[in-house]
């Protein structure tokens, strides 16, 4: 049971290049999320999805696009990378059965470290 | 504006003693609060949660306290162990069906052997 898998783990881009981060979960979870972690900023929500074919903006969506064509996959795209997008990106998922004392619990991937030069 | 704040970026505690991590929030409509632990080069993992209708939840060495009037929660770890050294994030959510979480900035705990 792999849980949440993110690829790639590391990537270096030049300003203006594009790339896609892939998140795959094998837990049949309905909800998927993309966060970025920056020093002193904690985890900030970029985009999320409440089901296949649906996406919505989070706290910091600018410069990113997402797609959820299949329930198990959530893709995060950078069309024209900027140095401000240098960060560690975390994907997370949760489902209707992932509750602890009433709280819906997120399962995170190991992260993807992106550097934009 | 930062709806969830962890004002202490770091904390050092001696092994066997109590660790207290604090978190403040501004929105009284949050329904649930969770704590996550993160080791370097790994994703955050769930630790413990509390509903806004409770003031305490305990799980082994970990206890979370919620003071709604002060909009403050704290995580107590007793006794602290070197393996507890990690970054701890508090998170708050609205149960609006999207289960979005707002995370704090994290507190790095170091437990000294």
Image (cartoon, coloured by chain):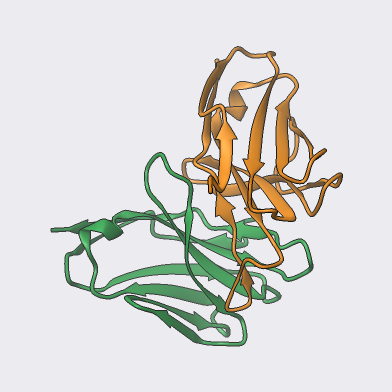
Q: Is residue A77 left or right of residue A44?
A: right
Q: Quadrant of residue A107?
A: bottom right
Vertical placement of residue A71 versus A22, above or below? below
Residue furthest right as drawn? A53
Q: Colour of chain A?
A: orange
Picture coordinates of residue B48 (x, y %)? Answer: 47, 71
Vertical placement of residue A37 versus A64, above or below? below
Q: Nearer the viewer, residue B27 or B18?
A: B18
Q: Quadrant of residue B19?
A: bottom left
Q: Nearer the viewer, residue A39 or B78?
A: B78
Q: Is residue A81 left or right of residue A52?
A: left
Residue furthest front as drawn? A1
Vertical placement of residue B64 versus B56, above or below? above
Quadrant of the snapshot with the C terminus of chain A: top right
Q: Colour of chain B?
A: green
Q: Nearer the viewer, residue A25 or B2?
A: A25
Picture coordinates of residue B55 (x, y %)? Answer: 51, 87
**Residue at horizontal 32%, vertical 75%?**
B61
Picture coordinates of residue B79 (x, y %)? Answer: 23, 73
Residue furthest left as drawn? B113
**Residue at horizontal 85%, vertical 47%?**
A54
Picture coordinates of residue B85 (x, y %)? Answer: 29, 55
**Residue at horizontal 70%, vertical 17%?**
A18
Q: Nearer the viewer, residue A115 or B39?
A: B39
Q: Quadrant of residue A73?
A: top right
């Amino acid at each position: 049971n792999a849980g949440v898998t993110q690829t790639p783990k590391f990537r270096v881009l030049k300003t203006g290049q594009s790339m896609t981060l892939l998140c795959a979960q094998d837990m049949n979870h309905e909800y998927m999320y993309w966060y970025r972690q920056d020093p002193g900023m904690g985890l900030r929500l970029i985009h999320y999805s409440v089901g296949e074919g649906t996406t919505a903006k989070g706290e910091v969506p600018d410069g990113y696009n997402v797609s959820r064509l299949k329930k198990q996959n959530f893709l995060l795209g950078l069309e024209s990378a900027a140095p401000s997008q240098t960060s560690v990106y975390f994907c997370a998922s949760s489902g209707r059965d992932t509750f602890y004392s009433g709280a819906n619990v997120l399962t995170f991937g190991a992260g993807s470290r992106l550097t934009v030069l | 504006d930062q709806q969830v704040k962890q004002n202490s970026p770091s904390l050092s505690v001696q092994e066997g003693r109590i660790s207290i991590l604090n978190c403040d929030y501004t929105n009284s409509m949050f329904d649930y609060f969770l704590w996550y632990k993160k080791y370097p080069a790994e994703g955050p993992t769930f630790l413990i949660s509390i509903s806004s209708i409770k003031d305490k939840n305990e799980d082994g060495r970990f206890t979370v306290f919620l003071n709604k009037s002060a909009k403050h929660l704290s995580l107590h770890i007793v006794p602290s162990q070197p393996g507890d050294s990690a970054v701890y994030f508090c998170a708050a959510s609205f149960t609006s069906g999207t289960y979005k979480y707002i995370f704090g900035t994290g507190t790095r705990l170091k437990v000294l052997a």
